[in-house]
Image: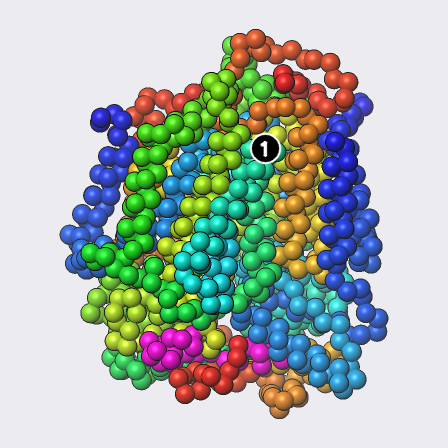
């Protein structure tokens, strides 16, 4: 099984390595196994949620409610646990609640056909709002050590959430590149009408994507609660933007139809080491924000100039053109396209 | 156009190098201070005090590698991550003001387990075993009580008052509110707490919430307390614009610089606070004393020398009231009683 | 006409219901002062909403308006403190807003970076820059002339309300009855067709963002001149409020349709709801959930009214 690296991904690897070298020079603590492994704890939370997010964005959708889902799931678990349910069943129920929330997103998007950005913008507020209302804003704490190990424990020196994340990466990568449904996801992003006419149940795939996003967000929410030790309604505030930043940095286009798991993971790693290394280098947080914003814009600029003239109107879709129906895979000398991608006509 | 990419990369890297802080100092005591967020005059004042203490200690031959850093806006996740990263640098002591008392416990414990002295200031963590000492600017009981006393003095002992708070989940806000209620119950049984609304630490929301309160309880509200420096000036503004300046008592927690104009005009007769410069100053001295062992972990009845402040008592147990009910604070060093800023004395202070 | 203004009338009805209920049950709600308060608080949000409506109608999005407002506010306050006359301060705020909007517009229209990324980067970078520059210190004291714009009353309502209404009416006219307005709608409706019809889509997009920035500069002066100090936390969360108002006001998130009037009514509805929470004694912890519910209700109403959303392809997912 050969892994072809796209040009974009090579740029990202270069950026990752370059930043890593620079950060290692700026602080002698940065490039130690202990520090790097610790940093992967944070990367795992973002990285897990970024997996279904990548697929959703490839399919030309978006899910802004992931962080609120994390908070809601964690709060559900906390409230159930407070009422006497043992922690692991409570966690399972919390994950179920998050999955249901994701399914609800998917149902309104796929069956009622409301635009994803509107639905998830609303559920971003509603899910977190419900968590706040139910808990009155106070946190729940005192979870047993067996649960906290999910966020703080290690296996053979590797943090548990990192292991879960790596498993998730493998599963997602295989799913997206090697299964038929994975290819259909790219197809939905490219030309949904054509796919529908081909007899594929697009609605079901979309529903599945958002349900999966809910499930993974809920799982990440449990890991977050275990790491922080509390279930609180303001958990993971703003994470959705970080996840989307990582996905876009990784080369996934918001117009849909392209993106890879490898790219997203590189994006997650870059953001993580920048945050980690810059703090160690004593760079103020405000400056870190500016830098990460610049890196993001710079990276997207770089992809743009290479990828050719494509209309990217993020909100308004281009109308499907008849001669693209069915799609054709053109030759790909520049190694620009991932499996299943198609070069858009200039 | 490949060189654009390379140029952008090089520029970014150059920026990073240029903005990196000073390199590691050898053989100096490393003390890190992490406020709730750096974007507040209040915390900038604590930084000022801390740096003053560092300079004084340097004059006495103690070199300290001091770093003041934190999230740019109040963000618990970012604070946890930053502290986690700072702990990896193995400082001798870390001074923290916790955005979320409970959420910061694990990372504080981790620091303590790694041999780092953990001192909290301004806002404690929920578990006292997670840190060595809490430098308390004033117990919730004292501060909440002072606010209520001000209302009683200026609006009468049967006043009807409302509270404009920050975030409904904020531990210190809720603790002050609990202390206020306790004081009312104990000393002013005829006083009434009419309503509590939340401005979420946003100026526009605090203003409109204050306006709504004034409108809703027209003629039936005698005072508003705003124990948050973001909201207090907006509450004063709302009272002025409703034509009720001087007729509604407005008071709360804020810095003298922020409230000077309102105090001079008379809209706000008294502002309650403590001296954040002194707070940061004391925190550094406590950290230093803990590192050198002058202040021993958990021993009852010690005192710590803090430069120009003289000595402060380090108590193993102090009773207080919090959002979760009565609490015995453990291992606390109290800065002092809350201070009242009025027209007469406000010009003496600059923070 | 009913069909064309259906959405606006629905919001008006909801507003009337809510305000009516409050007036009947809360004696203090229906007096002139409360009304003035609501209109004044809605004024600057409405002006920002004009710009946001244009941006969304053109098929883009702008989540950096809050940070832009804070920057304009802080610079304006600093200039006023340094002794600049107020008209110069206002001009500076407008120019600064225009400049920041133009920066967004250039990156989006000419470098073709998706608007969500550009405005996300601008949002973070500007907020970071503000914190870094001010260290949290507020800008004060401000000279006596500062509050003139914000507190002078004409016919019982403060200037910002009148200026806001003028802006809304002017924008509504421009969007509905001028060529440039048509071009914005065309661009949002079908960018390919617009280009083929000879519209310079890049230029229109650029100017939409630049004008939106200018409006933020105006809104800043309508807002901060009511207070005695400029706080660094100004504008936090403004973008979510404005986008909610735009969506509730009937603008199609895809672009191509929407009115400034609808947005303004949406702003009013959200402002009244906020006050309603206080008056009705509902815990503020439900505020966010209620806002989200509003969006869902508004959007469902659209589905019910038109039978189906605009099309199944593209960002429906």
Of residues B49 and C162, which is closer to you in this image? C162
Q: What residue would you read off at disc 1? A: C110
Specify whether residue B263 is painted magenta.
yes
Q: Position of residue C62 (x, y in %)?
A: 49, 40
Q: How many badges with numbers are in the image?
A: 1
Please give the name of the residue rendered at 19% of the width and 60% of the height, measured from the top-left corner: C28
Q: In which quarter of the image is residue B204?
A: bottom left
B124 vs B56: above or below: above
Residue A116 visible at all: no
B248 vs B86: above or below: below
Chain of residue at mark 1: C
Residue B39 visible at all: yes
In the displayed structure, does residue B178 sit left or right of residue B296?
left
Please give the name of the residue rendered at 66% of the width and 53% of the height, measured from the top-left corner: A288
In the displayed structure, does residue A342 sit left or right of residue C157?
right
Q: Position of residue A68 (x, y in %)?
A: 50, 44
Give the magenta part as a residue range.
Answer: B259-281
Of residues B302 and C73, which is closer to you in this image? C73
């Amino acid at each position: 099984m050969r892994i072809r690296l796209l040009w974009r991904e090579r740029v990202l690897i270069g950026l990752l390595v370059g930043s890593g070298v620079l950060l290692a020079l700026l602080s002698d603590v940065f490039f130690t196994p202990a520090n790097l492994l610790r940093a992967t704890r944070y990367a795992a939370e973002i990285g897990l949620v970024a997996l279904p997010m990548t697929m959703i964005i490839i399919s030309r959708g978006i899910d802004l409610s992931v962080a609120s889902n994390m908070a809601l799931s964690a709060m559900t678990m906390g409230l159930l646990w407070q009422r006497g349910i043992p922690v692991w069943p409570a966690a399972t129920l919390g994950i179920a609640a998050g999955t249901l929330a994701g399914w609800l997103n998917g149902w309104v998007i796929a069956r009622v056909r409301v635009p994803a950005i509107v639905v998830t913008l609303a559920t971003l507020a509603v899910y977190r709002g419900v968590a706040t209302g139910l808990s009155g804003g106070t946190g729940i704490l005192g979870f047993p050590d067996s649960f906290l190990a999910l966020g703080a424990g290690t296996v053979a020196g590797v943090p548990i959430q990192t292991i879960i994340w790596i498993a998730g990466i493998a599963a997602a990568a295989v799913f997206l590149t090697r299964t038929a449904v994975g290819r259909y996801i790219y197809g939905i992003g490219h030309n949904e009408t054509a796919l529908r006419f081909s007899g594929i149940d697009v609605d079901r795939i979309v529903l599945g994507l958002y349900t999966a996003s809910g499930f993974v967000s809920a799982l990440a929410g449990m890991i977050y609660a275990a790491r922080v030790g509390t279930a609180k309604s303001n958990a993971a505030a703003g994470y959705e933007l970080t996840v989307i930043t990582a996905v876009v940095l990784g080369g996934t286009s918001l117009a849909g139809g392209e993106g890879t798991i490898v790219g997203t993971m590189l994006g997650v790693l870059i953001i993580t080491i920048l945050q980690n290394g810059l703090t160690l280098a004593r760079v103020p947080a405000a400056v870190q924000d500016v830098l990460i914003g610049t890196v993001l814009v710079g990276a997207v600029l770089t992809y743009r100039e290479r990828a050719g003239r494509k209309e990217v109107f993020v909100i308004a879709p281009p109308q499907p053109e008849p001669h693209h129906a069915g799609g054709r895979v053109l030759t790909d000398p520049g190694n620009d396209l991932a499996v299943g991608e198609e070069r858009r006509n200039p | 156009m490949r060189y654009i990419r390379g140029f952008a990369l090089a520029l970014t890297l150059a920026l990073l190098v240029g903005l990196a802080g000073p390199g590691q100092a050898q053989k100096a005591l490393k003390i890190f201070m992490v406020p709730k967020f750096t974007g507040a005059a209040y915390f900038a004042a604590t930084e000022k005090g801390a740096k003053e203490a560092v300079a004084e200690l340097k004059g006495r031959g103690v070199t300290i590698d001091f770093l003041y850093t934190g999230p740019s806006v109040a963000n618990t996740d970012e604070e946890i991550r930053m502290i986690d990263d700072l702990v990896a640098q193995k400082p001798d002591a870390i001074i923290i003001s916790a955005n979320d008392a409970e959420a910061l416990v694990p990372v504080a414990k981790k620091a303590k387990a790694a041999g780092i002295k953990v001192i909290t200031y301004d806002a404690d963590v929920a578990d006292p075993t997670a840190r060595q000492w809490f430098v308390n600017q004033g117990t919730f009981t004292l501060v909440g009580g002072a606010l209520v006393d001000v209302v009683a003095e200026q609006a009468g002992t049967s006043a009807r008052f409302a509270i404009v708070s920050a975030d409904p989940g904020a531990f210190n806000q809720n603790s002050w509110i609990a202390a206020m209620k306790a004081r009312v119950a104990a000393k002013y049984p005829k006083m009434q707490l009419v309503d509590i609304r939340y401005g979420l630490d946003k100026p526009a929301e605090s203003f409109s919430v204050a306006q709504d309160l004034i409108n809703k309880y027209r003629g039936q509200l005698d005072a508003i307390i705003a124990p948050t420096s973001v909201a207090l000036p907006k509450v004063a503004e709302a009272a002025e614009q409703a034509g009720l300046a001087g007729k509604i008592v407005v008071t709360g927690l804020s810095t003298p610089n922020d409230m000077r104009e309102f105090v001079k005009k008379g809209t706000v007769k008294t502002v309650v606070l403590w001296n954040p410069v002194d707070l940061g100053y004391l925190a550094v001295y406590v950290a230093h004393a803990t590192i050198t062992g002058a202040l021993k972990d958990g021993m009852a009845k010690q005192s710590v020398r803090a430069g120009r402040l003289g000595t402060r008592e380090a108590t193993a147990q102090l009773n207080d009231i919090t959002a979760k009910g009565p609490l015995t604070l453990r291992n606390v060093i109290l800065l002092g009683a809350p201070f009242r800023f009025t027209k007469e004395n406000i010009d003496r202070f600059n923070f | 006409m009913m069909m064309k203004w259906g959405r606006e009338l629905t919001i008006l009805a909801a507003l009337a219901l809510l305000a009516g209920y409050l007036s009947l049950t809360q004696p203090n709600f229906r007096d002139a002062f409360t009304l003035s308060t609501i209109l004044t608080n809605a004024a600057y949000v409405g002006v920002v909403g004009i710009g946001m409506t244009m941006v969304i109608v053109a098929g883009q999005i702008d989540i950096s308006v809050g940070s832009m407002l804070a920057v304009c506010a802080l610079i304006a306050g600093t200039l006023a403190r340094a002794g600049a006359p107020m008209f110069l301060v206002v001009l500076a705020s407008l120019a600064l807003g225009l400049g920041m909007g133009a920066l967004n517009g250039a990156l989006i229209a000419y470098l073709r970076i998706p608007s969500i990324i550009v405005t996300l980067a601008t949002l973070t970078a500007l907020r970071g820059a503000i914190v870094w520059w001010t260290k949290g210190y507020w800008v004060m004291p401000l000279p006596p002339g500062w509050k003139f714009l914000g507190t002078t009353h004409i016919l019982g309502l403060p200037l910002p309300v009148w200026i806001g209404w003028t802006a809304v009416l002017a924008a509504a006219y421009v969007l509905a009855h001028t060529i440039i307005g048509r071009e914005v709608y065309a661009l949002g409706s079908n960018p390919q067709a617009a280009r083929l019809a000879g519209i310079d889509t890049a230029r229109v997009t650029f100017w939409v963002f630049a004008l939106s920035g200018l409006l933020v500069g105006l809104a800043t002066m309508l807002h901060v001149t009511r207070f005695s100090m400029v706080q660094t936390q100004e504008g936090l969360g403004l973008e979510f409020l404005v986008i909610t108002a735009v969506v509730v006001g009937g603008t199609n998130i895809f672009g191509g349709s929407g009115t400034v009037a609808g947005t303004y009514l949406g702003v009013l509805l959200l402002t009244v709801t906020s006050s309603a929470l206080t008056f009705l004694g509902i815990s503020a912890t439900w505020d966010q959930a209620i806002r989200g519910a509003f969006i869902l209700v508004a959007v469902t109403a659209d589905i019910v009214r038109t039978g189906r959303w605009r099309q199944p392809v593209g960002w429906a997912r």
